[in-house]
Amino acid sequence: MAPVAIDIASRPGENPTSSAPLKANLPLPVMSHSTLPAQWMFDEPIFELEKRAIFSKVWLLTSHTSHFSKPGDYVSGNYVFDYFIIRDRDNNYQAFHNVCRHRAHPVVTKSEGSSLVVGCKYHGWSYNPKGELVKAPKFDTVEGFDKSANGLFKVHTHVTEQGFIFLNYDSSATPVPFEDHFSQLPAEWKDTDFSEYEPFYQRQAIGNFNWKTMTDGYQECYHCTIAHPGFAQSLDLKQYTVEPLSNSARHYAPKKSNPEEMQRFTFVFPTNGVTVTPEMWYIMRTCPLSATKTRMEFDVFRRKGVPQEVLDENRKFFTQVQQEDFDLCEKTQRGLSSGIYNTGILHPREENGVLYYQGRVLDYCKTHLEKERHLGEAIYPARPLSQPDGEAPRCEADKICTELESSLSW
């Protein structure tokens, strides 16, 4: 699809990119900031731009090594694109687009499993954990067919020391270095021994809201006193601080039961959150499905040896908070899509995390759109560069697509 002309206006005021936290005892800044326009929360062309500008080329937190105990173990999912991650015989983590090179059927159809050969259930094409094609029934008699040219489309991976698995869909050989993209993130978890935890449970829910509607709420606790009464009882929300980092943000507040102990949460751009407690920790993934539909995924791990009743109590507490946020987002989305609301004012201290992340969204989209306007066509960073040479009919079909895209551009 060709890019659509989109007016991306900067918000008034400065973009708060400083890593210094805005403490509660600092003077209130005098400048004001507005939200992104409501159109950004329901417009499909903007969502398509976000897919190209953000989700196709940044590092995305998708899983943890705790889910893989041996070679052949795999997990699959959808984070804008369908993917699967598999542990190979060398104990490395490989990731691929979950699409067979033959006729595009998914290669794996289960959310998790274990196999050193994964086979498509359509025509039987099969691949090893390195993505190499090992079986293509009856193609051994096809002159010129090259197995080595028909391996799976690879997705870049990065595994942190703590076991977090990140994917990058950028099809170029050299995506943005992980260390540059998340220069401050690894230090967030350096004091946690994740080997003391094990997989506990996973939960999913699909909501009728834009992915940013949920992330808006995650990036501030201004709403917590009103919307999360149980949460407000456990933390000193007057001291709740959001500290923007490099494509991430540190959240922390003293526990009321022990003011010397901080509860910390980590926002991982563009849509993830990581919460660590002594009893359990979890990844919250906000996975966009469309401009107004989002799948929430919670990947929860328990500390080994913690009594079941304690885990059940924690599970009940966090599920309640998550459901409260879910309800807030669905109701807010109705207002955003109403055609009445356009923008609102954000509090420069209480909602500085929203200002930071919305600024990153805007920056990525503006930069990518400028490149597309200069080129005169849409740029799809995740689209694999290597495709088999086609015959004349396929080339003619591609030509028609190109002509249609050009006629719709700008």
Image (spheres, rainbow, N blue to C red):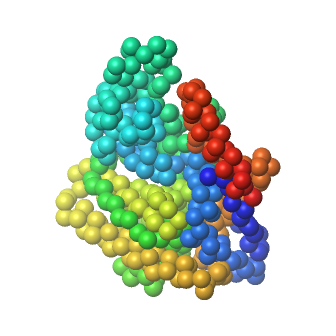
Residue 98 point in image, percent of width and height: 42, 40
The furthest residue to the right = 374
Along the line of sight, the residue nearer the viewer: 89 or 142: 142
Q: From where the camera sits, is residue 95 visible? A: no
Along the line of sight, the residue nearer the viewer: 283 or 94: 94
Along the line of sight, the residue nearer the viewer: 166 or 24: 166
In this rendering, the answer to whether 242 lies above or below 116 is below
Q: Residue at x 53, y 56 (%)?
A: 268
Q: Residue at x 19, y 64 (%)?
A: 309
In this image, 338 relative to 95: left or right?
right
In this image, 291 relative to 176: left or right?
left
In this image, 198 relative to 27: left or right?
left
Q: Residue at x 38, y 70 (%)?
A: 322
- Figure quadrant of residue 369: bottom right
Q: From where the camera sits, is residue 6 visible? A: yes
In this rendering, the answer to whether 37 lies above or below 311 is below
Residue 262 point in image, percent of width and height: 46, 65
Q: Disc count in the image?
A: 0
Residue 318 point in image, percent of width and height: 34, 68
Residue 368 point in image, percent of width and height: 71, 52
In this image, 113 relative to 251: left or right?
left
Quarter holding the C terminus is bottom right
Q: Residue at x 65, y 72 (%)?
A: 36
In this rendering, the answer to whether 211 lies above or below 135 is below
